[in-house]
Amino acid sequence: MTEFIVEGMSCAHCVNAVTTAIHALDPAASVDVDLGTKLVRVDSELDPFLLSQTLVDAGYDPMPVGLKMPDHI
């Protein structure tokens, strides 16, 4: 399970946009979005950093929860 705090989500359209972006990358992913806390939970086999970049490409600013960034970034 990968979790992100995604600032900038403010409505059902945002929830749909985030969910659609993840499903475009991984149709089998389970995506749970809590609009009130801005928490996005993704259950996917894909690399968390790839998931994060997908959200950036969709126009959002995801902050990983509990992930250590690689030293080379």
Image (cartoon, helix red, strand yellow):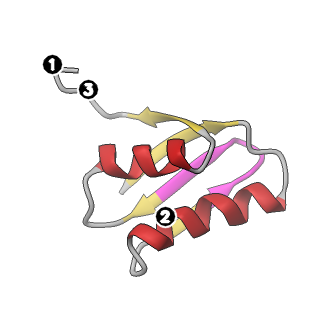
Res. 22 mark? 2
Locate the C terminus and report the quarter of the image it occupies.
top left
CB contact under 8 Å: marks 1 and 3? yes
Q: Nearer the viewer, residue 54 or 44?
A: 54
Q: Amino acid at mark 2?
A: Ile
Q: CA–CA distance between discs 1 and 3?
A: 6 Å
Task: Residue at 43%, 79% (x, y): give it.
Answer: 27
Res. 71 mark? 1
Q: Nearer the viewer, residue 41 or 46?
A: 46
> Where in the figure is residue 26, as x and y percent of width and height?
38, 72
> Where in the figure is residue 13, as x and y percent of width and height?
80, 61
How many residues crowd mark 3 within 10 Å: few (<14), some (14–19), many (20+)? Answer: few
The quarter of the picture where residue 70 lies is top left
Q: Is residue 71 visible?
A: yes
Task: Residue at 45%, 47% (x, y): give it.
Answer: 3
In the image, taking residue 41 as reference, residue 16 lies left or right, namely right
Res. 69 mark? 3
* Farthest bottom residue in view: 28
| Residue bounds of the magenta highlight | 33-41
Compared to residue 71, the image places residue 58 above or below, namely below
Question: Disc 2 on helix, strand or loop?
Answer: helix
Q: CA–CA distance between discs 1 and 2?
A: 25 Å
Q: CA–CA distance between discs 3 and 2?
A: 20 Å
First in sequence: mark 1 or mark 2? 2
